[in-house]
Amino acid sequence: MRANRSRDTRPEVRLRSLLHKQGLRYRVAARPLPELRRTADLVFTKPKVAVFVDGCFWHGCSEHLRASHKNVEFWRNKIEGNQARDADTDRLLREAGWRVVRVWEHEAPDVAAARVMSVVRASPPDRHESE
């Protein structure tokens, strides 16, 4: 399991590259909320947008998840736990005023980048900036 990266995965790097070419700047593998022990793959601090690039296996993609045939109960509980944590993370971030974008690893990078850009550019800047 050491080979499974938690950051800098191929889909994440491709997405970051496309967003950077479009002039967007972000933090990598950062906590949107310091008190919340959960890390987003990309964090746009001023527009308050958190982006998560989810792996099909680990997050239970309905299109690509192939159930394990060994230790079935363990893996089902693991993936369901990941999905519950993802939903909780989304809820907590939204309650704190953040917008959340979830990208599946199988999504075309240019389509995912366009979706992220539209959310980032549509988000109003932090209200404290103008004060």
Image (cartoon, rainbow, N blue to C red):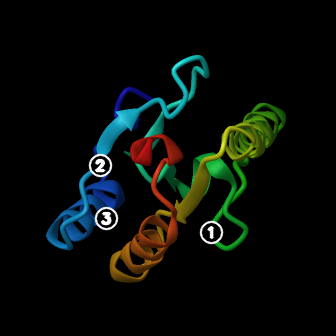
Residue type (three-letter) at the residue carrying disc 1: His
Quadrant housing the C terminus: top left
What's the CA distance linking mark 1 and mark 3?
20 Å
Task: Identify residue type, mark 2.
Answer: Tyr
Residue 42: percent from left, percent from top: 39, 48
Q: Are marks 1 and 3 in contact (CB under 8 Å)?
A: no
Question: In the image, residue 51 lies at what x, y percent?
Answer: 48, 53
Q: Measure the C-alpha gap from mark 2 to mark 1.
A: 29 Å
Task: Please name the residue shown 73% across and 42% down the image.
Answer: 79
Residue that label 1 marks: 64
Sequence-first tag of 1 and 3: 3
> Is label 1 or label 3 in front?
3
The residue closer to the viewer here, 14 or 116, is 116
Q: CA distance from mark 3 to mark 2?
A: 12 Å
Looking at the rendering, which quadrant does residue 101 occupy? bottom right
Q: Which mark is residue 26?
A: 2
Answer yes or no: is residue 45 visible: no
Where is residue 119? Give x, y as percent.
Answer: 50, 69
Q: Secondary structure at mark 1?
A: loop
| Nearer mark to the viewer, of 2 and 1 | 2
Is residue 114 placed above or below 17 in the rendered structure?
Answer: below
| Residue displayed at 44% across by 69% down | 116
- Mark 2 Cα within 10 Å, few/some/many (few <14, many 20+)? some
Give the residue at x 51% y 20%: 34
- What percent of the width, then of the height, locates residue 100? 60, 54
Question: Of helix, strand and loop, which one carries label 3?
Answer: helix
Pick the quarter of the image with the N terminus.
Answer: top left
Disc 3 marks a residue whose amino acid type is Leu
* Label 1 crowd bin: few (<14), some (14–19), many (20+), radius 10 Å: few
